[in-house]
Image (cartoon, grey):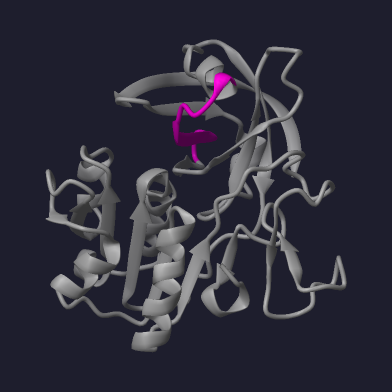
Amino acid sequence: MIKVDAKIIDQIHLIEDIYSLTIECPEIVKDAHSGQFVNLYTNDPSKLLPRPISICDLDKKNGFLRMVYRTAGEGTKQISKLTAGDVISVTGPVGNGYDLNSEKPILMGGGIGIPPMLRLAKELSEKGLKKEDITVILGYRDATFLLEEFEEVATVYISSDTGSVGIKGNVIDAAKHYSLTGDMIYACGPKPMLRAIQGFSAETGISAQISLEERMACGIGACLACVTKTTSVDDHSKVKNARICVDGPVFYAEEVEL
């Protein structure tokens, strides 16, 4: 994990409050992979804490890192105003990513948990899996983003809260509706969704790796503000807790209590 000042390559407003930000930071990109995140710092001295943002995609040849994020507060709103040529401070890569130990994966992304699934789908494709072997279920609120990029490397199914796109319901509803099966579930999204995936994993016997979303303070494992309950004793805290930022954000579903 290192901190660098990265040049912004571009920033695109995708839909509503969703933005795509690409930065040049080869020092971070060379060791980064799916499931990890970076910490972005604003140029506002009154906002000392970084904003953790998942990695959406990587271009290791050019040293580019792409994040797709939602503006949720003043910090991310400030970041959304940056343009090509501006400089932003970044720490990363942070955390443990996904284990690519699957031959028939099911990727489930909900809301702003959708972007990190794109890099994962591409890494599985680069590993040699065919498009028909990679199943992606995307759970939107009411409008799609990144859909065309997913369709280039995977077989995609859609659900939405309103039913305006795909079937009405969540990603589990879509999995059941289309009778989707595989040997590993990979997921990122809000806690209710991940809790449902835990249950679905136990019900079907399909192992699951889930990426937890949580508010963070330091984002580097020092403050213990983003702990989650675990089913075993953590080596760091000596209790049944783990730090989502550095011990995660990816855990096997049976390792955590949601």
Q: Position of residue 176 (x, y in %)?
A: 20, 74
Give the answer, above or below, for where 105 lies relative to 70: below
Viewer can see residue 102? no
Q: Position of residue 27 (x, y in %)?
A: 67, 37
Which quadrant would residue 187 be assigned to in this image?
A: bottom left
Q: Which of the two residues, 117 or 111, is positioned nearer the viewer here?
A: 111
Quadrant containing the N terminus is top right
Give the answer, above or below, for where 255 lies relative to 19: below
Residue segment shown in magenta: 61-74
Give the answer, above or below, for where 162 lies relative to 243: above
| Residue at the image point whose x is 45% and y is 64% from the top | 194
Q: How many marks?
A: 0
Which quadrant would residue 39 be assigned to in this image?
A: top right
Q: Which of the two residues, 28 or 246, is positioned nearer the viewer here?
A: 246
| Residue at the image point whose x is 61% and y is 15% from the top | 87
Name the side, left or right, on which 128 lies relative to 223: left
Name the side, left or right, on which 163 lies relative to 253: left
